[in-house]
């Protein structure tokens, strides 16, 4: 290689001298030869870099294997030093842990499959003008199912439809009950023909009754209503022809029909597809029928019906994603003891100052030391307990947390001044009929603290690797401690101020409206760097300047998937969680610069382009 390089440099020098002295054809030939040698030099350099990279990869692999052997050796030494009684007890504990692990993995698998079960029903106006819409659903249902399955390969999809016309028609409603066979669904739609409908208003209420009669069983339940005309009654439209302007012929009330769909059928979302503006007042009245409906009814106006399938797929994915984020954490049907929420900061002069004890984990100088403890199922060390004075607001400032209430707080060490940074303390919500003592055990708050401590360590290590990547922002997690005040436990951390954004969750959800390539790459990197031991996900927080003025991601309340499914709270879905992430993740430019291995979905050009953002 050195000989080739030497020849190349001599040739370049000779060519350069001749080029300045002569413009003859000989000089041109020499220049061509020089360019050829330059290309050969480039190839040699690439081969050299490749050899270096391969060598480094082998060294890394050997080092990991050496570390593993050292850990096994230490374990054997420790085991030999134990008495026979201690060894038997340790063996029993390890055996029980293995039983608990297998049990938890089966439980997770069952929960994940259940969380991906979806009932999708179409409610369609089947009067004369709607044949093209019926055909579109029939022709596109396979593509819609494939779109959902692309993100969730294990999805169990059932489909159904109800078609409605008007009072005077021979067949006011027709339906196809839920089926997991798409061929059965499309065959039923093939036998459905759009006809009838005397005036412009239609018997929508009979269609809603038909939807209520379907056999809804899946955890996720979606209703898509496609129509180009409103129901009867001047309350629901602005003057279309209507033979029953006083309202429904049979005296049915929309309030009762919608309540049945929400309460009895437990439909997750009702999505209305407007094909023109004549149905807008009707849906507005539907939404006003019940104060609790909120965004349960969603809507969109479609000038092109061929755009409906994309919305169907998106809504199906989002519904499953939301359900998956709650797997093993909270039952959405559980009712919690209510609290009065007050968004504003309290009058601190009226809040009593209490004495408390604050505990947090030590800071590891080497992240691998922490990972080794996780890998060998050891607890992370704690700092010495510190006394503090604390003021805690009487009311939570938000109800958005799925399982915890957040309260404003002010803290001062003893002795020491009150913290200049606003703080927040979080306490578990109390479900009706549950044992409060079990719910608020100290260990549960220490589990929450450990999740964020590990995430913070991983973020610090990640930042070392992206520091020189232009345009890529740093990632940090707030420091969490466990606070004990008068026998009550809390998790305490700095209050994050700014626009709150949920970037991804532990069920495969990616916020495409606020897509951040750095954060997706961070989750991917934690999996590879830990050698498939864990993955930090469920990333949420604010994008704000740090003390140095540079913008960075300030995050809290993450989740960790781990090979040890008995650790890191119930949000840990273990290998199933790893799979959920890679089902939706596409490697981006940050992943590429970190040399991460592309997942099953390949790569994307969305988000951060290193050096250009």
Image (cartoon, rainbow, N blue to C red):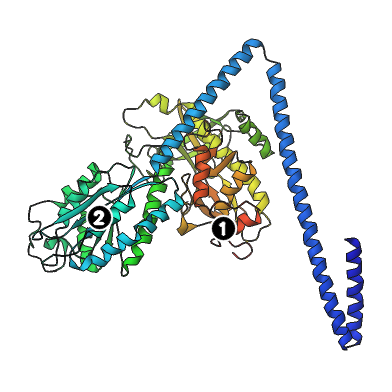
Q: Nearer the viewer, residue 557 or 181?
A: 181
Q: Residue at x 63, y 51 (%)?
A: 596
Q: Quadrant of the C terminus?
A: bottom right
> Measured from the top left, where is residue 522 in percent x and y?
58, 49
Tell me if I can see residue 517 in this picture. yes
How many residues crowd mark 1 within 10 Å: few (<14), some (14–19), many (20+)?
Answer: some
**Foreground residue among 153 and 449:** 153
Q: In the rendering, at what x and y percent does residue 49 appear?
A: 78, 57
Q: Nearer the viewer, mark 2 or mark 1?
A: 2
Quadrant where the N terminus lies?
Answer: bottom right
Give the tally of numbered discs.
2
Residue 18 screen position, x and y as percent: 91, 82
From what the image shows, is residue 124 above or below residue 211?
below
The residue under the point 22% across, 66% down is 130
- Cβ atoms under marks 2 and 1 closer than 8 Å: no
Name which residue lies at 64% across and 36% down. 371
Mark carried by residue 188 = 2
Q: Is residue 414 left or right of residue 256?
A: right
């Amino acid at each position: 290689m050195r000989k080739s390089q030497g020849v190349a440099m001599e040739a370049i020098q000779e060519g350069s001298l001749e080029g300045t002295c002569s413009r003859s054809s000989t000089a041109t030939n020499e220049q061509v030869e020089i360019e050829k040698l330059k290309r050969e030099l480039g190839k040699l350099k690439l081969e050299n870099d490749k050899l270096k990279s391969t060598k480094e990869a082998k060294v890394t692999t050997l080092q990991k294997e050496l570390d593993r052997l050292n850990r096994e050796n230490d374990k054997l030494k420790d085991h030999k030093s134990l008495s026979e009684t201690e060894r038997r007890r340790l063996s029993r504990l390890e055996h029980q842990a293995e039983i608990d692990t297998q049990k938890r993995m089966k439980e997770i698998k069952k929960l994940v499959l259940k969380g991906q079960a979806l009932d999708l029903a179409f409610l369609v106006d089947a009067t004369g003008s709607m044949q093209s819409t019926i055909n579109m659903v029939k022709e596109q249902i396979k593509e819609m199912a494939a779109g959902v399955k692309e993100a969730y390969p294990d999805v169990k999809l059932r489909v159904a439809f109800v078609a409605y016309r008007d009072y005077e028609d021979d067949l006011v409603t027709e339906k196809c009950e839920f089926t997991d066979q798409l061929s059965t669904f499309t065959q039923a739609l093939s036998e459905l023909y759009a006809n009838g409908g005397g005036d412009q208003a239609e018997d929508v209420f009979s269609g809603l009754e038909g939807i209520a009669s379907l056999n809804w069983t899946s955890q996720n339940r979606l209703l898509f209503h496609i129509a180009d005309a409103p129901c009867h009654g001047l309350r629901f439209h602005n003057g279309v022809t209507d033979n029953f302007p006083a309202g429904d012929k049979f005296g049915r009330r929309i309030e009762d029909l919608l309540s049945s769909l929400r309460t009895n059928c437990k439909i997750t979302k009702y999505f209305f597809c407007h094909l023109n503006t004549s149905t807008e007042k009707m849906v507005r009245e539907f939404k006003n029928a019940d104060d609790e409906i909120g965004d349960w009814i969603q809507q969109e106006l479609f000038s092109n019906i061929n755009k409906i399938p994309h919305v169907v797929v998106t809504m199906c994915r989002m519904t499953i994603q939301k359900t998956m984020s709650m797997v093993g954490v909270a039952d959405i049907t559980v009712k919690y003891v209510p609290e009065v929420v007050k968004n504003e900061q309290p009058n601190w002069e009226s809040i009593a100052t209490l004495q408390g004890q604050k505990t947090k984990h030590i800071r590891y100088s080497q992240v691998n030391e922490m990972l080794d403890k996780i890998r060998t199922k050891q607890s992370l060390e704690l700092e010495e307990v510190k006394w503090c004075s604390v003021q805690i607001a009487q009311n939570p400032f938000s109800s958005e947390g799925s399982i915890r209430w957040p309260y404003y707080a002010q803290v001062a060490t003893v002795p020491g001044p009150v913290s200049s940074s606003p703080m927040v303390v979080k306490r578990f919500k109390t479900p009706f009929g549950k044992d409060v003592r079990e719910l608020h055990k100290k260990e549960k708050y220490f589990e929450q603290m450990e999740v964020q401590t590990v995430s913070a360590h991983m973020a610090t290590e990640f930042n070392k690797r992206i520091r020189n990547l232009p345009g890529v922002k740093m990632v940090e997690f707030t420091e969490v401690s466990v606070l004990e005040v008068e026998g009550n436990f809390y998790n305490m951390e700095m209050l994050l101020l700014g626009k709150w954004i949920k970037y991804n969750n532990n069920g495969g959800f990616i916020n495409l409206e606020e897509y951040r390539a750095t954060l997706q790459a961070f989750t991917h990197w934690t999996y590879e760097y830990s050698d498939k031991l864990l993955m930090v996900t469920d990333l949420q927080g604010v994008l704000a300047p740090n003390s140095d003025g540079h913008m960075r991601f300030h995050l809290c309340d993450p989740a960790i998937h781990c090979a040890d499914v008995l650790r890191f709270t119930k949000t840990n879905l273990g290998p199933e969680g790893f799979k959920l992430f890679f089902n939706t993740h596409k490697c981006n430019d940050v992943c590429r610069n970190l040399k991460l291995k592309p997942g099953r979905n390949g790569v994307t050009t969305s988000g951060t382009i290193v050096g250009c953002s």
